[in-house]
Image: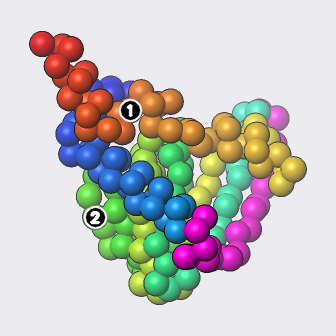
Amino acid sequence: MTTSIQNTHDKVKFRQNVLTIEQGIKDKVASGEVVPDDSPLKHYFSPIDEKYGCCAYAREILLRKGSLVIGKIHRHQHLNIISKGKVTVFTEYGKKELEGPCTFVSEVGLKRAVYAHEDTIWTTIHLTAHVGEENLDKMEEEVIAPNYGDLGLIASVDDLVKIEEEKL
């Protein structure tokens, strides 16, 4: 991964903004001002394929109409399927309107803000060495980065400026 290309001002500004929005949502939930949605989440697993040493893990969620969801930072490219519904997706690559059925590949390090215009069923599919809901923590460590820095990506415009100034 060439992080210098991925750490452009616009991309870093988006990351900073989406983290600020996410923290604002968490603060409102913590204060009781906002009640988190109880959207159903389903997990599916294929058996581990001995030849490849991994299994396929699918995570399906219902995004309710009118909801704003901030996703996690993914370590690997993976498949996404919108079975039904309509959403606007905001990423550091821009804004997209997506409507099911559609399938696409996510980029490494991508974190999304998603607004659901309709009830939407969204499934992500990952390869993992772990099987079963009892291993969800292990799978998350494997496929989710805890922060942008873990992937060599910058999430603060101030940090980007400091790094650019140090290069001069």
Residue name at image x 45 percent, y 61 percent: 24
Residue name at image x 76 percent, y 40 percent: 138
Looking at the picture, does residue 84 appear above or below residue 133? Answer: below
Name which quarter of the figure residue 53 lies in: top right
Task: Determine the secondary structure under disc 2.
Answer: strand
Disc 2 from disc 1: Cα separation: 20 Å
Instruction: From the top left corner, tell me how far across and down residue 46 is, in percent.
Output: 78, 53
Name which quarter of the figure residue 38 lies in: bottom right
- The overriding secondary structure of the stretch rendered in magenta is loop
Task: Determine the secondary structure under disc 1.
Answer: loop
Residue type highlighted by circle 2: Lys
Residue type highlighted by circle 1: Leu
Q: Residue beneath label 1, please?
A: 153
Q: How crowded is mark 2: few (under 14 residues within 10 Å), some or many (20 or more)?
A: few
Determine if residue 103 is in view.
Answer: no
Residue name at image x 66 percent, y 37 percent: 142
**Does the magenta portion include 67?**
no
Residue extent of the magenta highlight: 30-51
Q: Residue beneath label 2, please?
A: 95
Nearer to the camera, 42 or 18: 18
Q: Which disc is residue 72 wearing? A: none
Nearer to the camera, 123 or 23: 23
Instruction: From the top left corner, tell me how far across and down residue 134 is, in percent.
Output: 87, 50
Q: Which residue lies furthest to the front in this view?
A: 31
Instruction: From the top left corner, tell me how far across and down residue 119 is, in percent.
Output: 53, 85
